[in-house]
């Protein structure tokens, strides 16, 4: 199943950043992703395949839960 990501999502990456943070905010989506470390504010660009492989979980979705349908690949976070 393909995950969809949106600008404003907070994601946890599989590898820890050298600053010690593993939570990132998605700033740009498309063929490449721009993400910002929430601990040190470092901005990094990754290609889509590399980003999708590196994401462990979505911590906070940028979409309101009312816009997420039951058939959506993104379930509301509890």
Image (cartoon, rainbow, N blue to C red):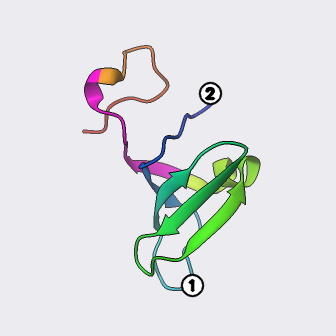
In this rendering, which labeled residue sits more in front, label 2 or label 1?
A: 1
The earlier-in-sequence mark between 2 and 1 is 2
With 42 as the anchor, is 59 left or right in this view?
A: left
Local crowd size for mark 1, using a 10 Å CA cut-off: few (<14), some (14–19), many (≥20)? few
Q: Is residue 67 magenta?
A: no
Question: Dots 2 and 1: beta carbons under 8 Å?
Answer: no
Local crowd size for mark 2, using a 10 Å CA cut-off: few (<14), some (14–19), many (≥20)? few
> Which residue is label 2 attached to?
1
Is 73 located above or below residue 69 in the figure?
Answer: below
Q: Looking at the image, which residue is at 50% across and 67% down?
A: 36
Q: Looking at the image, which residue is at 37% across and 16% down?
A: 69
> Which residue is label 1 attached to?
18
Q: What quarter of the picture does the C terminus occupy?
A: top left
With 25 as the anchor, is 60 left or right in this view?
A: left
**Disc 1 on helix, strand or loop?**
loop
Q: Position of residue 76 (x, y in %)?
A: 32, 32
Q: Is residue 58 magenta?
A: yes
**Disc 2 on helix, strand or loop?**
loop
The magenta stretch is 56-66
């Amino acid at each position: 199943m393909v995950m969809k990501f949106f600008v404003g999502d907070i994601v946890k990456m599989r590898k820890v950043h050298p600053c010690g943070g593993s939570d990132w905010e998605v700033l740009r989506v498309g063929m490449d992703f721009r993400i910002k470390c929430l601990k040190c504010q470092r901005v990094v660009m990754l290609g889509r395949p590399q980003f999708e492989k590196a994401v462990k979980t979505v911590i906070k979705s940028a979409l309101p839960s009312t816009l997420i349908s039951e058939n959506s690949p993104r379930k509301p976070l509890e």
